[in-house]
């Protein structure tokens, strides 16, 4: 980018995708790019592009980028990037980012991200629950980047520390123990659930490798069985909690969004409780962009 005169901030180290999306608006960037296999098999590395609103690209921008990629002059590297990186590594002592990243800017962005969470009204503490009554958590990053962000999130919300699944807690591009690291994929949580049961944990929380998907499982100590929640169930529980916690007392009209392939429970809740529910096309980009539009219309968008 910089060789073409484009100012570029490289976030330092391994960074969760939600931090990248937040950073676009935080530093007023024109675009954000995340290189990640996400929740796909290790060989399916991907390239996520976020527009200046912090949402993934949508028409017509996506088509314009795709068209530029296949132009003849773009089908081969413009320069020998490998040689450039080797030169940077020699000059800057190597490391994950070859001396090209901005650690201080990254720290400031991450601090701003968690401050935004604290300012959101979501941090309400644990209602009168003693340590002995609180559920215990196991967490798996699924060989990805989520562990430090999950720790900081628990701290931000005042939750007791969780137990990380050791075999999956550090970034590992080979996805050694879970070849398809999607928390919603059957069997993906098996190792985490076995660890949780061994250590007496009630709940498993799982992120995919770039930490923008969530899986949840709960252990029933009565029958010794696990319940792995679907995305629809997680969304419904979150929607109910958000409404009961801050939505019903909001001074602004409240809205929630879900994609057209999702459960209709939030729609039914909205009709009963009196908040706006909107259905969007499938994908984070459509949910996020509609949420931003609703914010400009004066709604407080909770989900």
Image (cartoon, helix red, strand yellow):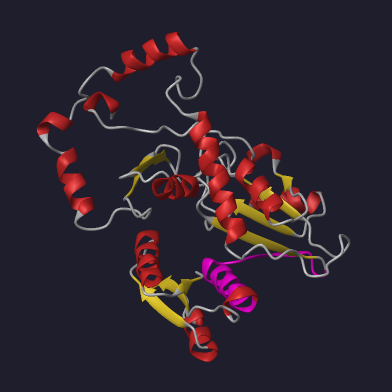
Figure quadrant of residue 31: top left
Which residues fall within the magenta stretch? Answer: 222-244
Q: Picture coordinates of residue 175 (x, y %)?
A: 54, 38
Q: Residue at x 48, y 50 (%)?
A: 18
Figure quadrant of residue 121: bottom right
For residue 101, above or below residue 46:
above
Q: Picture coordinates of residue 164 (x, y %)?
A: 71, 44
Does the magenta-highlighted stretch encompass residue 225? yes
Q: Picture coordinates of residue 107 (x, y %)?
A: 55, 37
For residue 70, above or below residue 150:
above
Q: Residue at x 40, y 37 (%)?
A: 43
Q: Main secondary structure of the magenta part?
A: helix
Image quarter of the N terminus = top left
Q: Is residue 47 visible?
A: no
For residue 226, above or below residue 236:
above
Q: Is residue 76 visible?
A: yes
Does the magenta-highlighted stretch encompass residue 278? no
Query: Left or right: 16 with respect to 297?
Result: right
Q: Residue furthest front?
A: 251
Q: Residue furthest bottom?
A: 272
Q: Picture coordinates of residue 198 (x, y %)?
A: 80, 49
For residue 133, above or below residue 273:
above
Q: Residue at x 56, y 40 (%)?
A: 145
Q: Residue at x 74, y 65 (%)?
A: 225
Query: Left or right: 104 with respect to 5?
Result: right
């Amino acid at each position: 980018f910089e060789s073409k005169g484009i100012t570029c901030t490289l976030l330092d180290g391994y960074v969760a995708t939600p931090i990248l999306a937040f950073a676009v608006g935080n530093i007023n960037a024109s675009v954000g790019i995340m290189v990640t296999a996400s929740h796909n098999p290790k060989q399916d590395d991907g390239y996520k592009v976020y527009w200046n609103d912090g949402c993934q690209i949508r028409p017509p921008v996506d088509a314009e980028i795709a068209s530029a990629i296949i132009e003849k002059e773009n089908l081969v590297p413009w320069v020998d990037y490998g040689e450039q990186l080797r030169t940077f590594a020699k000059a800057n002592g190597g490391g994950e980012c070859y001396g090209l990243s901005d650690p201080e800017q990254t720290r400031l962005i991450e601090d701003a991200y968690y401050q935004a969470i604290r300012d959101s009204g979501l941090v309400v503490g644990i209602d009168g629950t003693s340590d002995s009554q609180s559920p215990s958590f196991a967490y798996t990053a699924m060989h990805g980047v989520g562990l430090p962000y999950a720790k900081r999130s628990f701290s931000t919300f005042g939750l007791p520390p969780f137990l990380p699944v050791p075999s999956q807690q550090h970034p590992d591009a080979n996805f050694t123990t879970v070849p398809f690291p999607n928390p919603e994929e059957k069997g993906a949580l098996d190792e985490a659930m076995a660890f949780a049961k061994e250590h007496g944990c009630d709940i498993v929380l799982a992120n995919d490798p770039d930490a923008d998907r969530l899986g949840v499982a709960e252990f029933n100590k009565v029958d010794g069985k696990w319940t792995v929640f679907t995305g629809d169930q997680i969304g419904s529980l979150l929607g109910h909690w958000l409404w009961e916690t801050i939505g019903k007392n909001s001074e602004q009209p409240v809205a929630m969004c879900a994609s057209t392939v999702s459960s209709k429970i939030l729609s039914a809740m909205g009709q009963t409780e009196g908040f706006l529910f909107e259905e969007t096309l499938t994908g984070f980009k459509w949910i996020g962009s509609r949420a931003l539009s609703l914010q400009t219309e004066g709604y407080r968008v909770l989900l």
